Image: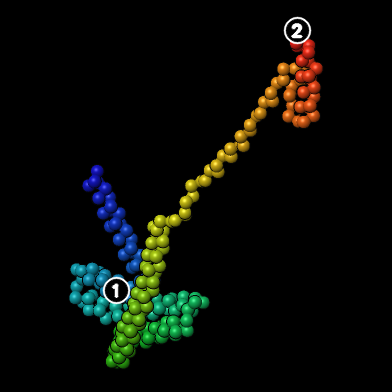
Amino acid sequence: MKITSSANTFADRAVSASFFVLNEAKEAGKNDPALAMRLAATAMSPQVLSGVGMPIKDSYEKSIVPIVRGGLLALNIFRATETFKDPRSSKIEKGLDGLRVATDLVGFVGGVLTLVTPQFAATGNSMMGFAYAADVVSHAFRGLEHGANRVTVWEDIRRKKSRAEAPIDNGDRTPTVPPIATPPKTTVVSAPVSSGLFVAPTSTAQQYLNNMNSTLTAPLTAGV
């Protein structure tokens, strides 16, 4: 039973870690789609070219650069459009995204010149070199910015989790039962019963009548 529980715990942690990695990869791709496409294209190239002859590989190497530059341009245009639509974006963010589009355009034109017009190959190579240098700065800036933002998000999640797991002190909520009031003790005093016709009351007038009753009945009692 203990082994099964440990295995389930390990599996749950592995799944959580996998989801975490995938989510962070998705967030990184949203932050810098151009870099995501570049890394994906670089990783897939050997697989795509597996078993392909050298003439095709040579043509591929000449064509891949302007095609990738065109993809980078399209993705950065998309990113810049989203930045300009976002009312929370600062002027600096808008300016940087605009510069990225401009440098991507320079690199794309340079790649096309290198591929299509051999006489302008040197100019095209210079333009692509400038674009690559701008790419390095752009990717580094976006990566640092994204890392700082994600740390803030993780800290916020950690604080919320800590607050959720903290015990809540609601105080002593045990209902208090009020004491039952004890009715005052009533002492019943029985008045003495006279030997005559009247019952002895407590008031003075009644006592007087009681004495008279005793006086009147005394001779009769003696006669009997």
Q: In which quarter of the image is residue 210?
A: top right
The residue to which callout 2 is attached is: 224
Between 120 and 35, the residue placed more toward the observer is: 35
* x and y percentages locating residue 212 in the rendered image: 80, 22
Q: Which residue is drawn at 51% across and 77% down?
A: 87
Q: Label 2 neighbourhood size at 10 Å, few (<14), some (14-19), many (20+)? A: few
* x and y percentages locating residue 192 in the rendered image: 69, 23
Quadrant of the image containing the C terminus? top right
Between 34 and 87, the residue placed more toward the observer is: 87
Q: Which residue is drawn at 44% across and 79% down?
A: 80
Amino acid type of the residue that numbered disc 1 sits on in the rendered structure: Leu
Query: At numbered mark 2, what does the secondary structure look like: helix, strand or loop?
Result: loop
**5 horizontally vs 195: left or right:** left
User: Can residue 123 be seen in this snapshot?
Assistant: yes
Q: Which residue is drawn at 23% across and 68% down?
A: 47
**59 horizontally vs 208: left or right:** left
Single out the residue that lies furthest toward the top. Answer: 224
Quadrant of the image containing the N terminus? top left
The residue to which callout 1 is attached is: 39
Amino acid type of the residue that numbered disc 2 sits on in the rendered structure: Val
* x and y percentages locating residue 196 in the rendered image: 75, 17
Q: Quadrant of residue 145?
A: bottom left
Residue 79 numbered mark, or none: none
* x and y percentages locating residue 73 in the rendered image: 39, 80
